[in-house]
Amino acid sequence: MASIFKILIMTKISDRLANLEESATLAMAAKAREFKEKGINVISLSLGEPDFKTPKHIQEGAKAAIDEGKYFAYPPVNGYLDLRQAIADKFKRENGLEYGSNDIVVSNGAKQSIANVMYSLVNPGDEVIIFSPYWVSYSAIVQLAEGKAVYVKGGIESDFKVTGSQLKEAITDKTKVVIFSSPCNPTGAVFTQDELEDIAAVLREHEGIYVISDEIYEHINYTGGHVSFASLPGMFDRTITVNGFAKGFAMTGWRVGFIGAPTWIAKACNKMQGQITSANCGISQRAALTALTSDLGPTKEMAAEYLRRRDMVFELLKSIEGVKVNLPTGAFYFFPDVSSYFGKSVGDKVINNASDFAMYILEDAHVSVVTGQAFGDPNCIRLSYAASEEDLREAIDRIKKSLAKLA
């Protein structure tokens, strides 16, 4: 009866939505909550969410804005001018990028920023090259924009990084956009300046292709320096730089993302956003302004703690037989290859792929991770180390014991 009801619902919703996959990270988080509601002690390593609280001074900035009483009306669609100017100043100070305040659009998270850009640039049938593994929403947003996703894959042997020669082979006369993240979700890979220059050299030969550079994990970078793609020669006028406050400032729930872009693209995104959500929450914007105009000490402390956890988790994962793992240089994820377990079983449970693997780990070890299938690599899983040391040690110990049962 339930399946019939589901079919009836699916016949009523739009084809656009019916053909859209649910976010795998949110789906696994929902599964983990179901287990927790049954009283099962699940350790969640599935969501890309800092386990730190928003720094106190940022909270105080929001409180002060409430007390001031000036920020309860609709803000400008693209964000308050002083916040946009502070973002432009940040781009110049930290990234060497000369954006004006009118080149900035503040949105309800970086996900909306990416969607705004994609809807503004992509026509039906346009090709969007996605560096794979990729954040799950990239492909869904391309699909909603009626574009065609073209995947260019980097393997674990190259730290999941795509090369310029691979990009060159993927470009056609229908290519409109290239999108990637560095530091990368889900792999933690960080492109070096030379590697980005290799990519830029290819794009200089192809006018009319735009780049969405997702730099949301900019502050969680263990390489000693972040390179913005738009800073490379010839790339500024063709690059949309996406960033936000969720990861580096532990502000996921405040929902503040932004872009820096050529003025005409920023205006297009402002027009798009004006018809979807209008502006981001006024109080959240004041918190974001506080974050940008205050000391980055708490952000650096969080990054240092993530680095310590990375090193610990790396050693723990290496101790699990059959798990192939590389050392990520940014963000807070591992993306291990678990394909050696495919075909193994315990009882009537058979591990055929990474999705089966993730579900087995949830059911047997009570640890939630995400299948790599959703990120473009069916041999891997994504594991977040944005959790306490105690939980991380316990989670990996549970995983190790569960995998030992498979034969």
Image: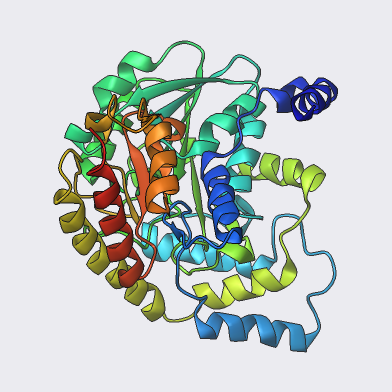
Residue at image coords 29%, 24%: 343
Give coordinates of residue 337: x percent, y percent. Answer: 26, 36
Judging from the image, the colouring scheme is rainbow
Give coordinates of residue 259: x percent, y percent. Answer: 56, 50
Front-most of 329 and 406? 406
Front-most of 259 and 346? 346
Q: Quadrant of the N terminus?
A: top right
The single residue placed furthest to the top in the displayed view is 173
Asked if 132 appears above or below 148 in the picture, the reply is below
Asked if 144 appears above or below 46 in the picture, the reply is above
Residue at image coords 58%, 66%: 85
Front-most of 66 and 234? 66
Residue at image coords 57%, 17%: 126
Number of disc labels = 0
* Left or right of 360, for residue 138: right
Q: Quadrant of the C terminus?
A: top left
The reply to whether residue 233 is visible in this rendering is yes
* Left or right of 140, for residue 190: left
Residue at image coords 58%, 70%: 288
Quadrant in the rendering for residue 381? top left
The reply to whether residue 258 is visible in this rendering is no
Give coordinates of residue 261: x percent, y percent. Answer: 54, 45
Give coordinates of residue 86: x percent, y percent. Answer: 55, 68
Front-most of 401 and 329? 401
The single residue placed furthest to the front in the displayed view is 347
